[in-house]
Image (spheres, rainbow, N blue to C red):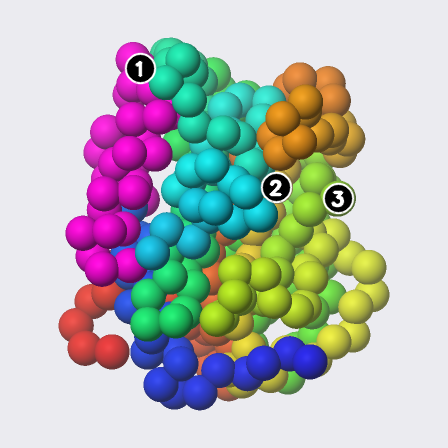
Amino acid sequence: MINRKSRDDIKKMRLAGNIVALVHQEMKRVIEPGISTKELDDIAYRTIRQNKAIPTFLGYNGFPASICASVNEQVVHGFPHEDVILKEGDIISVDVGATFCGFVGDSAWTYPVGKISAEVERLLKYTQEGLWAGIAQMRDGNILDDISSAVGAVADREHLGIVRQYGGHGVGRQMHEDPFLFNYSVGDKTPIKKGMAIAIEPMFNLGCDDVEVGPDGWTVSTVDKKPSAHFEHTVIATEDEPIITTKLLEGNL
């Protein structure tokens, strides 16, 4: 059963999402050549705890960190590590969740490390465009496939690979709730209703679609080792413009 959020639930989700946005604000500030992914994880943990929230990822099914730090060909679920030092030309997807007042905010962003190549810059640009295209379809009266089709159309137009084994998901009191959201059209006619909350998260590759899980049982990478990008916001449907909970709050709720 898909749980629709009340007005009070939405307020709490926006507070949780604001904390996630604060983490990303810090990530944007500190990511540069020479920093380790463990340092990024430490910064995220401190930011979440200083704001009286719980790092949702830490301990989730045994996951050992507060962020997923996925570098270059790594798609999702990368482990932060003191030995992984970012260098000029890398890209890194930072995925982070925070639980506040019993509700979860979940968002990922892919950051350039210094100057990146034109083709990788293009990958980031159009993966982010896929996110915004999906968000625009998140409104009462549409169906899930409207989101999936909008996301996938961007990848198809730009001849980018689409990660097919992973996708978006419902979110609320738990990080992963129904429904699952594909990043390409599968004909899912599940109706989008006012108050439904979904983490929309395109994952596009510079090469083929295919990915594999590494020896750690978590880290997902492209089979052809070409770069992958990942952008995600937690979004709540309304009858009009969708509410993006994982952005910095402005003014009153």
Tell me what residue is drawn at x 29 percent, y 59 percent. 53
Q: Residue at x 68, y 22 (%)?
A: 215
Determine the secondary structure under disc 1: loop
Segment tinted magenta in the rendering: 24-53
Q: Position of residue 85 (x, y in %)?
A: 38, 14
**50 within the magenta span:** yes
The disc at residue 164 is 3
Quarter of the figure with residue 119 = top right
N-term mark: 2 or 3: 3
Above-or-below relation of 155 to 72: below
Above or below: residue 134 compared with residue 157: below
Q: Is 135 displayed left or right of 21 in the figure? A: right
Q: Residues within 10 Å of mark 2 (few under 14, many from 20)?
A: many
Residue 60: percent from the left, percent from the top? 52, 49
Amino acid type of disc 3? Arg
Q: Which residue is mark 2?
A: 203
How many marks the image carries: the answer is 3
Q: Element at badge 2?
A: strand
CA–CA distance between discs 1 and 3?
31 Å
Taking depth in this image into account, of 24 and 153 the one nearest to the observer is 24
Residue picked out by circle 1: 33
Query: Do residues under tags 2 and 1 come within 8 Å of each other at their CB atoms?
Result: no
Could you say where residue 196 lies in the image, as x and y percent from the top left? 55, 77
Q: Is residue 244 visible?
A: no
Identify the residue shown where x is 73% and y is 18%: 224
In this rendering, is residue 104 above or below 194? above
